[in-house]
Image: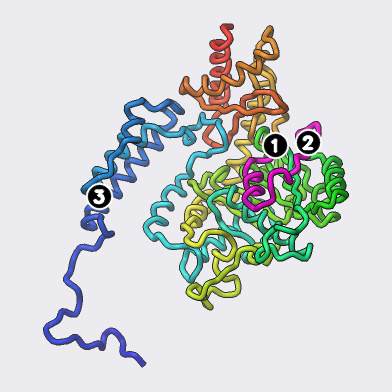
């Protein structure tokens, strides 16, 4: 038995301990200096967040400020921590994207949850690799992935998911598992032999499916030509009859259908596909059902719209983003799978230097995806969810969907505006259409409107195309938004539209 540290002898003439010094992070000066800088950083960030609602949502950077960042020289000597904070306060924080503001209605970028902001600092201080091993971040990630699955009602076997950089990466992981299963069922080992020589695999999605699905198909060697665009029905949802017909045609042509991608909140309108009939068809045809729930899957927590998500739990995989509707600071996506073995069998590759019996039956997270060194994402997810709790999160989401429905009502009541789709989650698709404006002029003005509104600085909204029509797309993710903010949004759209059309 080895002696305890208390009984170790010290050679004569040598100190028992290193010379005392004030502890602190390497390169941070003394512990006192780091502590002072950390307090100053907390004040800086707190002041920034508190002042956001009083500032313009977004403004272009002054050319000189932009150029100063672009031309920043490589420092030859170090800058003290206090000097770094001063530069951050002067050169970065005054020029935000705008998504922290309650009148930011653009894209699907949320305001950061305060609990997640604080947890990010602690996670950075620990700075582990969450690939695997026996340390807190690994076990916490398994817990928060289970929490996410519980929030959206998705079945969660142990090891049935992991955190990613976002839904784009989560989609690649899920589709890779679907590809491997399809190849195996066809008698092919795609990990060893690649795709050359096997019948082309075919996937199906609607035109409203996010571009990350096409990127995943291309990166996985499927080819975008074999990602079929299935027509949507009158409500903008995947048409199951058209899907069945497309599958039959491809089978007749000797191709191998293997995947259907449905949406829990489409890009343009936030529509939620009818999952049960799609799942029935996938079960019949032995196809993998993947659901893109990047933004909208958490809408199931709102009792007013939860019925739209019936059948979501039948999917083989689900990709979603805690860094969207939950407000977890970027980056944080999540891949959930029904069959753990399919995901692990797609990515597991354990070199001898990474063998770790202590990891247990589930192994390392790096066996379930592409990343080996993985950041400590789970702490900010844990903090965000734990701070609000299921009830608080559900209340926030219900408020956003209620505001979206109210915005839809305001649009319908306005003679200069037109609602282009029913409001299903928290995205409102509408356009400026005053009386007397020719159809081609309506499209032209709505193409220019988003930037014109953004430049005014009072609200931020983006544009898109829906059924070949230019539109405005307002996404509500911030529970701090008020009905007055909605009224201001529409007032700004009308004002900018009038300037563009000389009305």
Structural distance between the alpha carbons of marks 1 and 2: 9 Å
- Dot 3 or dot 1: first in sequence order is 3
Mark 3 closeness class: few <14, some 14–19, many ≥20 residues within 10 Å: few
Q: Position of residue 18 (x, y in %)?
A: 19, 73
Left or right, 43 with respect to 290, comes to left
| Location of mark 2 (residue) | 232
Q: Secondary structure at mark 1?
A: loop
Q: Residue furthest left?
A: 13
The label shown at residue 307 is none
Give the residue at x 73% y 61%: 181
Mark 1 closeness class: few <14, some 14–19, many ≥20 residues within 10 Å: many
| Location of mark 1 (residue) | 208
- Dot 2 or dot 3: first in sequence order is 3
- Magenta stretch bounds: 208-237
Relative to 407, residue 394 above or below: below
Marks 1/2 in contact by CB < 8 Å: the verdict is yes
Q: Position of residue 397 (x, y in %)?
A: 61, 41
Q: Secondary structure at mark 3?
A: helix
| Location of mark 3 (residue) | 36
Structural distance between the alpha carbons of marks 2 and 3: 58 Å
Mark 2 closeness class: few <14, some 14–19, many ≥20 residues within 10 Å: some
Q: Nearer the viewer, residue 346 or 35?
A: 346
């Amino acid at each position: 038995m080895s002696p305890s540290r208390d009984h170790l002898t010290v050679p004569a003439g040598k100190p028992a301990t290193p010379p005392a010094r004030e502890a602190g992070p390497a390169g941070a000066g003394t512990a006192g200096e780091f502590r002072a800088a950390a307090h100053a950083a907390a004040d800086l960030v707190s002041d920034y967040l508190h002042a956001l609602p009083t500032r313009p949502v977004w403004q272009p950077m002054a050319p000189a400020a932009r150029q100063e960042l672009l031309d920043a020289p490589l420092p030859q000597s170090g800058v003290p921590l206090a000097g770094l904070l001063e530069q951050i306060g002067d050169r970065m924080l005054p020029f935000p994207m705008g998504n922290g503001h309650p009148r930011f209605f653009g894209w699907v970028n949320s305001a950061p949850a305060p609990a997640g902001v604080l947890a990010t600092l602690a996670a950075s201080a620990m700075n582990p690799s969450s690939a695997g091993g026996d340390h807190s971040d690994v076990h916490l990630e398994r817990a928060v992935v289970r929490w996410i699955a519980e929030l959206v009602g998705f079945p969660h076997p142990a090891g049935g998911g992991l955190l990613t950089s976002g839904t784009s990466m989560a989609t690649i992981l899920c589709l890779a598992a679907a590809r491997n299963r399809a190849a195996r069922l066809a008698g092919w080992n795609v990990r060893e032999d690649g795709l050359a020589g096997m019948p082309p695999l075919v996937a199906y999605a609607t035109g409203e499916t996010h571009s990350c699905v096409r990127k995943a198909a291309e990166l996985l060697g499927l080819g975008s030509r074999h990602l079929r665009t299935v027509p949507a029905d009158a409500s903008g949802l995947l048409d199951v009859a058209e899907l069945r017909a497309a599958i039959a045609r491809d089978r007749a042509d000797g191709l191998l259908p293997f995947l259907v991608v449905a949406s829990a909140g489409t890009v343009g309108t936030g529509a939620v596909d009818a999952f049960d009939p799609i799942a029935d068809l996938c079960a019949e045809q032995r196809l993998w059902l993947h659901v893109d729930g990047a933004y909208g899957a958490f809408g199931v927590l709102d009792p007013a719209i939860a019925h739209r998500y019936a059948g979501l739990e039948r999917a083989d995989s689900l990709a979603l983003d805690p860094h969207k509707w939950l407000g977890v600071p970027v980056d944080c996506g999540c891949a959930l799978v029904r069959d753990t073995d399919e995901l692990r069998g797609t990515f597991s590759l354990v070199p001898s230097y990474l063998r770790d019996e202590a990891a247990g039956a589930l192994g390392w997270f790096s066996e379930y995806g592409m990343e080996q060194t993985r950041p400590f994402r789970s702490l900010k997810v844990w903090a965000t969810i734990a701070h609000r709790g299921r009830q608080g999160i559900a209340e926030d989401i219900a408020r956003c969907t209620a505001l979206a429905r109210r915005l839809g009502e305001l649009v319908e009541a306005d003679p200069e505006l037109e609602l282009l789709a029913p409001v299903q989650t928290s995205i409102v698709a509408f356009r400026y259409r005053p009386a007397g404006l020719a159809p081609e002029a309506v499209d032209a003005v709505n193409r220019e409107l988003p930037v014109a509104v953004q430049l005014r600085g009072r609200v931020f909204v983006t544009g898109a195309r829906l059924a070949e029509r230019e539109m405005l797309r307002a996404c509500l993710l911030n529970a701090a938004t008020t009905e007055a903010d909605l009224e201001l949004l529409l007032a700004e759209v009308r004002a900018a539209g009038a300037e563009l059309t000389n009305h």
